[in-house]
Amino acid sequence: MARIPACKAYTIGFGLSGADADAVSLLNSAADSNHGHGQAFLAADQTGLSEALMHVVSNILEINSSFVAPIIPTSPENKTSDASRVYIGLFKPNNTSYWEGNLKKFGLDSYNDLCDKSDLNPSTTPQKCLNYATYMDVVNNTTKLPPADGKDDRDGTMLPMGKTNGAFRDSAISFWSENADAGNVTAGGAGALLQARTPTDRRLFTYLGNANLADASNSFTVSNVAITAGTLGVADSVARDNLINFVVGYDAYDDNSNGSTTDNRDWILGDILHSRPAVVNYKKYTFSTANESSCSTNKTMIFVGANDGMLHAFRDCDGSEAWAFIPPDTLPNLQLMHSATHTNFLDSSVSAYVYDAPVADGLADTVYLMVGQRRGGGGIVSPAKGYYYLIDASDPENPKFVKSISNATSGFSELAETWSEPKLSKIKVGTEYKIAAIFGGGYDNLNEDRRYGAATTYPAASVSVSNTDLGAGLVSSVETTTALNPKGRGIYIVEIARLVAGASGYTSDFTNIGSLIWSYVSNSAASFVGEISTVDVKNRGYTDRLYAIDVAGTLWRFNIGALPSTTDTTTWSGLKVFTANTTTDKGKKVFYKPTIVRDYCYSANSNPAICGDVAETCDMVFYGTGDREHPLNKNVVDRIYMVKVKDSETTGNKTESNLVDVTTNQLQAATVVTNTGTTCSPTPGSIAYILRQLKLGGGWYIKLNELAGEKVLATSAVINKVAYFTTYVPTNSDPCQTTNPGDSYVYALRYNTGEAILNLNTANDVASSTTNTRSQTSGETVLLNRADRKKGVGQGIASGVVVTTSSTGKVSVFVGAGDKPLTNPGITKAGTKPVKMLNWRLR
């Protein structure tokens, strides 16, 4: 069998005629399956050449990728440590409408290294992987210090050509798979199991009026006459049957040109683009390889959305699909699955509420799922719209429909595309405790898709913006008018369950599930796209404060029980606490939730004669800006922010003038100003002066101005006083630079000053400084400076960081980027405190 080369060859013959048969033969041979493993094209004119080049570019960019952060659920035995399993949603973009996807499962050893299905080596303590699934190359194998040396840090294996830190080993076999599949989207995993099934054996449901989704009246099959051509928006019964057969998995349109329309499609499972797998343990069991693979013992389910129009339920025991749900609002859009462009359907993550009933086997537990659709519920007609669905999955094999919520639902008229993943949290309403789903109003696609670059207002309604207009490069959209029929401009709190006190604790009452508890609509045009962050200010066991960021980068605080509000919803309030954009420095957008750290903030004594600062509790809010829907734009200087919000604040509305600009990292500069002043009046520019500004100021910010277009496109994380951010940098818009989808970086910053805290750039190592000893205070043996704040982690848009704690208490920080969905970039600060279980008995 011919060896597949490390690079593929694509050939184009331009202006060749019939007399050039030898040349055509050579081009075909160079690209065929025995040689270049690419494609050959012939072009007779400029138009043909352009089309050929576009085909080549599209094929080059068809790479196995993962954007969402991998999921590492809690252990079925120990809720203080993470399970030794990792679930990764994958997608493979291509130049057709249907993108392939997959769900794969891997192991995790005591050192938080990724294992393939061979799992752990029983002869090692603590246990290590028997076979590693990925390569890890962070340090030199001899010195055990950076930089990397091209060898795996754990077993000394030389990395093959083209492999780097975090890349899958070609020999890796994922769980549920029989052969090496590594990160290949169209091999192994749940996708291969689905591919091997007869499509009509699948249990596919929609909702047509019967709450029991497993009832035949909801079955998504050709035989269900309740699904008509009109239901699907197609012309006649033939088109109806073809579409249903295509969706369930048949090659109904003979796309593989083999003359059959009853064979399976080349790949059935759709792309898992923005949906994080939700893992629900239905039954506690003693964890072992035998028990995990036994479907009578392991009742764990994985719920994940995909752009094949479905919410999938996969069994953890063997990776098989138990059922899939097609939201009824998507039925008229399913025809777009077989069209010229890629279409989103169910592209958001599932939130799960599990009521753990006091029954040992877990079969009496109640499980409710809530899921939005991101772009999948939207449209191109004003105003923006979207749907949330509530599903009763208490019986994991037979789900029930509970409710849908859209802007047609009473009380939810502001709802836009449902991008904001519901945050399930315990709150107090009056004298009652409730489990609530808290989410933002969503993404106003009809306005925000047309706004990019350094723009605050919007193009006129008559200005058409096509799907191919990505706002790439140093460009900005036209600023003409205010938003057209804006939507998504607030937050919602919806009841999931009322907690009822009893003799043996609380039980859950679901009578009012889906009812609106409270909402807030702002008077701005900016929608609330991201997840909402929750805070328990008084440590009373329930959420009493929320933080949200609208798409214009404005930070909002909502008190829903924290002072000055009470548990009476009439006292709940929203406050704009920080504005990122100005009339001259504009265009910064935010799509993700902030990270909150409770700490102390300081103010100077009101008596200037007294040199003593006054402390009070506050929230430190961390987030970054970046336009997720126009990632190639370079016309905005985005930011990383830490904003302090004191508990006593009532006016809010800070700007960057209230924060300290730490972009150049003067605290760790090689040369600093000598302080000749006093403690409360240090010399301007000195270390003491900057530290005092940071102590008394409203926070800090970093301008991402070193690389054009650098932006934050994921949620931050803070652990052990280190703030982690990932960023994305688009590549040059030169059409010759087609193979690089952009670069990603991870930042590790001291949480209260924005300084570098790890030696992430070994190329600039200097042993000492005569004027600035602070740059070595982190414990490193070399000086740290601005360049040590970040480190490259790969190509493509990175996920947010994933923090995991192993069964031995080891804490690790991971990042996913492109075809390396779980990379340990070596950025965990030494001395990070592990999480351990404590047990005691009260007498």
Image (tube, grey):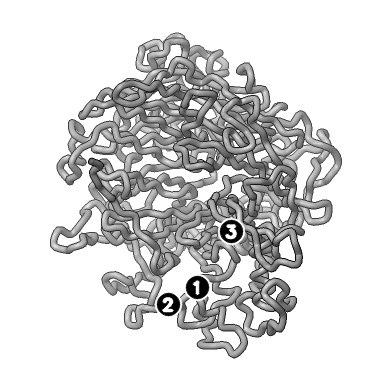
Q: Relative to 239, say whether 356 is above or below.
A: below
Amino acid tagged 2: Pro
In depth, the one of 222 and 127 nearer the eye is 127
In depth, the one of 533 and 430 nearer the eye is 430
Q: Residue at x 18, y 34 (%)?
A: 297
Q: Residue at x 55, y 71 (%)?
A: 756
Q: Nearer the viewer, mark 3 or mark 2?
A: 2
In the image, residue 394 lies at what x, y percent? 33, 23
In the image, residue 203 lies at what x, y percent? 34, 23
- Mark 1, Cα crowd under 10 Å, few <14 / some 14-19 / many 20+, is many
In the image, residue 749 lies at what x, y percent? 54, 65
- What residue is disc 2 on? 146
In depth, the one of 240 and 180 nearer the eye is 180
In the image, residue 288 lies at what x, y percent? 17, 45
Q: As drawn, is 817 to the left or to the right of 607?
A: left
Distance from disc 3 to disc 2, alpha carbons, whole Å, reads: 23 Å
Distance from disc 3 to disc 1, alpha carbons, whole Å, reads: 17 Å
Q: As drawn, is 519 to the left or to the right of 187?
A: right
Q: Quadrant of the N terminus?
A: bottom left
Q: Residue at x 63, y 27 (%)?
A: 519
Number of on-image labels: 3
SS of the residue at dot 1? Answer: loop
Amino acid tagged 1: Leu
Question: In the rendered structure, are the residues bearing label 1 and label 2 in contact, judged by CB atoms less than 8 Å apart?
Answer: yes
